[in-house]
Amino acid sequence: MSILIDGKSRVIVQGITGRDGAFHAAQMADYGTKVVGGVTPGKGGQVTEGIPVFDSCHKAVAETGVDVSIIFVPANFAMDAMCEAADAGIKLVVAVSEGVPTLDVMKAVKFLDEKGAKLIGPNSPGLISPGKAKVGILPGNIFKTGSVGLISRSGTLTYEIVDALTRGGLGQSTCIGIGGDPIVGLHYLELLEMFEADPETEAVALIGEIGGDAEEKAARFIAEKMTKPVVAFIAGRTAPPGKRMGHAGAIISSGSGTAEEKIRAFAKAGVCVADEPSQMADLIRTKLNI
Amino acid sequence: MKIHEYQAKEIFAEYGIPIPGNDVCRTVEEVVKIYKSTSGMAAIKAQVLVGGRGKAGGVKLARTLEDAEKHANAILGMEIKGLTVEKVLVYEALEIVSEFYVGFTTDRNTKSVMMMASAEGGVEIEVVAKEAPEKIIKLPIDPRYGLMDFQARNVAMELLGDVKLARKAASIFQKLYRCYIELDSSLTEINPLVLTPEDELIALDAKMNFDDNALYRHPQIEAMREVSPDEAKEISAKEMGLSYIKLDGEIGCMVNGAGLAMATMDIIKLYGGSPANFLDIGGSSNPEKVIEAMNILLSDDNVKVVMINIFGGITRCDDVARGLSKALDMLNVDLPVVVRLSGTNAEEGLSILSQKNLITAESMGEAARKAIELAK
């Protein structure tokens, strides 16, 4: 088992004829993901990287059967793409697009909610269930099948930590990059709940950063609802207030959203927080007594 | 992006929200001139892009001409949180019956626009939120439907009690919401919204921040941007696809990815060093970007050591190494450079750099230790 995606997931790529879309469609297929189609309006009937292209999500769904869509379109078209996927009946939408206006994300989140579709991102590196499927831009080779679930607001920092876990013999069930924007689809709470219910996941690694209070909420949820151990890392202890640290959502505003507050909340909830990324593997091993 | 109070008030005025006078002065003489046009009581307010102007002494009431001159002298040129005051806003002070707060902001938790209103106006809303949260009315708004009339009306009634006044207030709320939504604001607030003895409601202060991701569709807002010297560097970096923020330390960092870049600064501090900056070169291995990144680090006089931390994913380490190699050939780098390459094609990357005069490290911890040692 894994969460959200597995070897049976049928995936389409919105924006497949763009440079990034084409490259990552091929990478995902190489990894073993069932990439059944792509969507670019006006380019239906073409074939990109051996994958058939459709004019709309609705056509792709009708002709191939689709569970998941991944979006690579430019930021100003991202809201439309997310809503189209959900309107076509796709139940999991992964938005890689970076720089999407916040109000667009808000509207898409509400539209997808009403359609019963789940959203990951935007500004997300996607997700991977190692050995089964990859829907995103994550480097497949560093992941290994196993029992650690991982949730992160970051990209390369996730790879850094996953690489250390894999080298340390700790494989992963599913790893999800939820996106670095202030408003994103699925967040810690929903994903923690899924990992708690997933029989294959034995422990969860949570990689947070400054900005907002989602980590504090996650800490409360973990204390009240989780039986599986959770370990965390928080990036941005040295970030100055009022500055956006690369991610649109990584900002300490009016003195709140600091790393200290988040670390304190986790400590209170009994969640071990690593001082540096390389400690994550040891913390998990200690928690699992292995 | 932030704008000044007077700029936000210009926008408010366009949307029909009542504001007091909005004269901006850059010299004491101009302040005196505007003061003379008032009935004798004038507010003089520093225009800087940080909060806490009042506490810093940047907001004064002038009751006499001497007052106006004295305050203008004191405020123009004063430093508030590192920013020099170059402009003041001067307007005739109003008689105030009561003060309210009203604002719209992006709420991460409800994933909605959050309307906030309070009868505790004129004080820091963050303080009210912490000490007496029950005094703030909060109302999540679905941006697809907007602020509905009944919502605006009900909040106004709760705040003002009187129907006639509430109608006036509700109309201001609607206009304020339009400012927020039509301009892709991330925060639009009036603090305080004041009630005068003549039963007029006036926006005595104004604040607007904007969503950077949406500025592409609002060139008129982008045109209001005013940059401090530090920000100028950040903005020119951004044009190159780099995300840069200057700090005060000695170890210049170059990292791929925002989260890893923050973690790199943190580990330097953890081991007893001080990071000079945040610098995310993104996913590309374009040599131009690496050269520009190196230029930015070298232009900071505080930097004693450069630490490069790359985790190769889809971006391959050998590509980054080629860019770096080219950058080192082109630039005269006379500082020690510590490089850590890990992930995809790290070995190939390191062998490309083996002819260069670099210090290599296996992990980010090791790189940080070496950089700190060299900075001593």
Image (cartoon, rainbow, N blue to C red):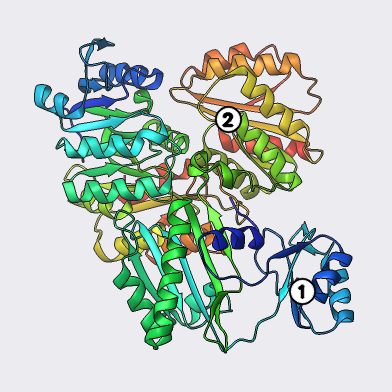
At 72% from the left and 18% from the top, the residue drawn is B328
Q: As shown in the figure, which amino acid type bears the numbered disc 1?
A: Gly
In front here: B170 or A47? B170
In front here: B150 or A264? B150
At 76% from the left and 45% from the top, the residue drawn is B229
Same chain for marks 2 and 1? yes
Residue A84 in the image: state x and y as whole percent. 23, 36
* Quadrant (top left, top right, bottom left, bottom right) of the N terminus of chain A: top left
Q: Is residue A249 left or right of residue A270?
A: right
Mark pair 2, 1: CA separation: 39 Å
Q: Which residue is mark 1?
A: B57
Q: Quadrant of residue A153?
A: top left
Q: Is residue A169 left or right of residue B365?
A: left
Q: Earlier in the sequence, mark 2 or mark 1?
A: 1
In front here: A47 or B59? B59
At 60% from the left and 32% from the top, the residue drawn is B242
Q: Judge whether A156 appears above or below A114 on screen.
A: above
Element class at badge 1: loop
Judging from the image, mark 2 belongs to the subunit labelled B
Residue B201 in the image: state x and y as whole percent. 52, 78
Q: As shown in the figure, which amino acid type bears the numbered disc 2?
A: Gly
Residue B353 visible at all: yes
Residue B317 marker: none
Residue B253 in the image: state x and y as whole percent. 65, 36
* Quadrant (top left, top right, bottom left, bottom right) of the C terminus of chain A: top left
Element class at badge 2: loop
Q: Residues within 10 Å of mark 1 (few under 14, many from 20)?
A: some
Q: Which residue is mark 2?
A: B241
